[in-house]
Amino acid sequence: MQVIFARRARTPDGWKQNVRITCKGGVISTIEPDSTAQADDTRVDTLLPSLANLHSHSFQRAMAGMTEFRAAGKDSFWTWRDLMYRFVEHISPEQYQAIAALTFMEMQEAGYASVGEFHYVHNQHGGQHYDNQAELSEQVFAAACQTGIGLTHLPVLYSYGGADKAELNGGQMRFGNSVETYATLVESIRKSAEQTLPVDTCVGIAPHSLRATCPEDLAQVLHLAQDKPIHIHIAEQPKEVSDIQAWLGARPVEWLLANTPVSDQWCLIHATHMTGAETQNMARSGAIAGLCPITEANLGDGPFNGVAFLANDGAFGVGSDSNVCISLSEELRTLEYSQRLRDLGRNVIIPGEGSVGDVLYLGAATGGAKALNRNAGRIETGALADLVAIDSTSPALCALREDQLLDGLCFAANGTVVTDLWSAGRHQVQSGHHINRDQIVTSYKAAMSDLLASI
Ligand code: ZN
């Protein structure tokens, strides 16, 4: 059992003062506002529900900063993807673990308690399965153990190199599975997760995208999700939309909504290019919009229809996707700024009146937890203790009233205001640093030096 004493905490009923929170087995068991701290309590300033990072490809952290050089001709998403494939061709299981551990640690230091790892590198160089089909997922599990992050693992079905069943080639060979081998992979990953990871771990499924599967295969794998999350990349780039339209006769979101039982069990990643009707229908389906504003800006994807989606009560969460820069506050403000830049206005994503920071932060807390199947996203008895403490006395926040704190966190602060973080009660960030930081950074540097030498 552990007890946290917060000078203030944000509960579903608003801000409470002098709150003692008891956690047992990773779950919040009591919440007592207007209390007095006891000698052994962990004292923090301002306690918030921590966010889930709902979409990550952790290994891509290793190439951050390497694709910002403009070569002759027009640089684009697809040239970024070429470098990613070069990395994929060379990365070893040990390097995979070291990179994932650094990525997860940085997420926790930024204020994320959990991650949805959309994991698509499964095979050896050339496409052979490893003797243990779940080898690379187990490296992700080892990184999750080392960091203590809450993991929703999303093994990816990736069968084709592009729309209309194009063949896999080059770096893509490490991703490939048929429906049959995917089923055995998911089963073996579930077994391994049960044996090695804490009970808050979840294993869902992730058909990569419409272009990397096909309608028949998609229909055959959905039952593997059981009652766990289903994530899919959906409409990130205009070329993806036109390829799918040419092949299936409908835009990606339109096709998915018409041909699969999309519900709140689903998370649609990068639903960037949608018509007004698609936006409204997706919001009504209950599916969570998995938004990755920093990556979407970095890759030049375009802005999400956030204003219309929220006006239709759409659920959303955020993810760091390519992990080019892991910053929770920057992720949230980039979402709002993308709408402002497009609409030439301020405070635009919020339906009605109120604090934009509240809508962004608390909306992403609820939607992100739902997308990762975590009973979290709020400070409430019975919920997982996915908690983050920030320092409201830091220069970025000290002049703000309580009702402005989430605005300050989203728009005026960065990760340095995070002091503590708990992932299902595991107190992994203390005084602003992950408790295993030194060891994780040392392993990462060694892995990167080996990987870069091999490319
Ligand atoms: Zn992605």
Image (cartoon, grey):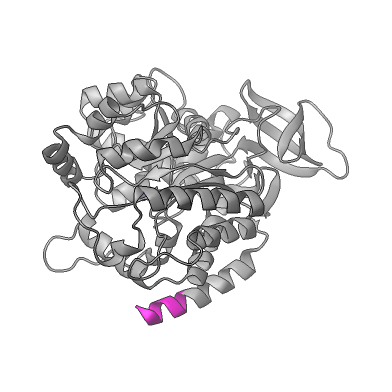
Q: Is residue 88 left or right of residue 278?
A: right
Residue at 57% from the left image edge and 36% from the top image edge: 374
What predominant SS class does the magenta segment belong to? helix
Q: Position of residue 379 (x, y in %)?
A: 65, 30
Instruction: Report which quarter residue 39 is drawn in.
Output: top right
Residue 46 visible at all: yes
Identity of the residue furthest to the right in this view: 39
Identity of the residue furthest to the top in this view: 352
Q: Quadrant of the C terminus?
A: bottom left
Q: Position of residue 38 (x, y in %)?
A: 87, 39
Residue at 35% from the left image edge and 58% from the top image edge: 175
> Does the magenta run of residues contain 331?
no
Residue at 45% from the left image edge and 72% from the top image edge: 92
Nearer-the-camera pick, 340 or 307? 307
Nearer-the-camera pick, 15 or 27? 27
Q: Is residue 4 left or right of residue 262?
A: right
Instruction: Report which quarter residue 352 is drawn in.
Output: top left
Identity of the residue furthest to the bottom in this view: 453
Q: Is residue 206 above or below residue 98?
A: above
Nearer-the-camera pick, 217 or 53? 217
Total labels drawn: 0
Residue 415 visible at all: no
Q: Is residue 75 left or right of residue 189?
A: left
Q: Position of residue 185 (x, y in %)?
A: 46, 53
> Does the magenta run of residues contain 449?
yes
Q: Is residue 308 above or below residue 199?
A: above
Residue at 34% from the left image edge and 47% from the top image edge: 208
The range drawn in magenta is 448-455
Q: Quadrant of the N terminus?
A: top right
Q: Position of residue 222 (x, y in %)?
A: 40, 36
